[in-house]
């Protein structure tokens, strides 16, 4: 799965920078993104080589809707920590929203070398290629995934592969007797990827419906912010039209 990365600060130098990063992470967790951004700006001013600060600031900028700014900070982080390049799926998502679809495809292809069992990675590469080359080509070139045990990831993969319908994803998410928390998480991912699926199919109205529901199923993961940011961007786009 898309694992949350780089949130534990271990390599920064100096207590002052460390304190700023911890305070920024706490503000971010509370949804105080502007406060987190201000703290991270101070951390970077204190130590311009504090890689973790750029990573955290990139995440925060994305949450504030600053896509280009998030990419710039992710790039700087990777310059400072080149071993993290392949696994940096957050940068791939930012590339998608920036319209840099070739770069996004390459990023997700790199992540495949880190984890070949992640349906989300295959879907995001599909989304980039669908924008660039069309659905038929994206479906033909879809990354092969091993076993992703999360429900309903198998059904989400089959949906994008053209072998299942949207209702099958929701049925899978609701199947069995999951706890309330587990059902909330399942429905979040189901509606997030249904929203992305409908957008790739050119149905902005259905995409917004599902992304709105996804954002209502709040989970403590970066992907919830992706759903929220996408919902807000799509609302603005539809309103303009």
Image: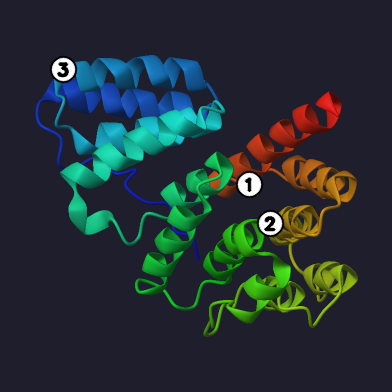
Give the residue pinned by disc 3.
46
- CB atoms of marks 2 and 1 within 8 Å: yes
Q: How many marks?
A: 3
Quadrant location of the C terminus? top right
| Secondary structure state at the residue bearing disc 2 | helix
Marks 3 and 2, how far apart in space? 38 Å
Q: Residue at x 42, y 48 (%)?
A: 91
Instruction: Name the N-terminal-most of marks 2 and 1.
Output: 2
Q: Is residue 221 visible?
A: no
Residue linked to disc 1: 219
Which numbered disc, 3 or 1, marks the residue that appears first in the sequence?
Answer: 3
Q: Residue at x 53, y 45 (%)?
A: 222
Q: Are marks 3 and 2 in contact (CB under 8 Å)?
A: no
Location of residue 135 with respect to 208 vertically, above or below? below
x%, y% of residue 237?
77, 31
Label 3, label 1: how far apart the Cα atoms are? 33 Å
Q: Position of residue 204 (x, y in %)?
A: 84, 46
Q: Which residue lies at the image location 46% right of the left edge and 32% below the top edge?
A: 68
Residue 155 point in image, percent of width and height: 74, 76
User: Which residue in the protein does label 2 denote?
Assistant: 185
Within 10 Å of the Cα at label 2, are there few (<14), some (14-19), or many (20+) other Cα atoms?
A: some
Judge left or right: residue 234 versus residue 23: right
Of the two numbered discs 3 and 2 in the rendering, the one whose residue sits closer to the viewer:
3
The residue carrying pointer 1 sits among few (fewer than 14), some (14 to 19) or many (20 or more) residues within 10 Å by Cα, namely some
């Amino acid at each position: 799965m898309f694992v949350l990365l780089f949130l534990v600060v271990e390599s920064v130098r100096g207590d002052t920078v460390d304190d700023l990063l911890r305070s920024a992470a706490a503000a971010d967790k509370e949804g105080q993104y502007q406060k987190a951004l201000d703290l991270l700006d101070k951390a970077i001013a204190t130590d311009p080589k504090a890689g973790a600060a750029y990573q955290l600031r990139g995440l925060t900028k994305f949450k504030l809707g600053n896509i280009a700014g998030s990419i710039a900070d992710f790039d700087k982080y990777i310059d400072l920590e080149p071993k993290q390049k392949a696994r940096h799926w957050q940068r791939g998502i930012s590339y998608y929203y920036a319209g840099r679809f070739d770069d996004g495809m390459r990023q997700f292809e790199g992540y495949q070398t880190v984890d070949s069992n992640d349906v989300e990675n295959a879907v995001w590469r599909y989304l980039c290629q669908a924008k660039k080359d069309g659905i038929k080509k994206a479906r033909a070139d879809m990354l092969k995934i091993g076993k992703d045990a999360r429900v309903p990831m198998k059904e989400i993969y089959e949906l994008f592969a053209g072998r299942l319908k949207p209702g099958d994803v929701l049925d899978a998410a609701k199947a069995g007797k999951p706890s309330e928390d587990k059902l909330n998480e399942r429905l979040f991912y189901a509606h997030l990827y249904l929203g992305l699926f409908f957008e790739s199919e050119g149905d902005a109205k259905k995409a917004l419906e599902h992304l709105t529901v996804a954002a209502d199923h709040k989970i403590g993961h970066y992907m919830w912010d992706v759903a929220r940011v996408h919902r807000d961007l799509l609302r603005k786009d539809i309103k303009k039209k």
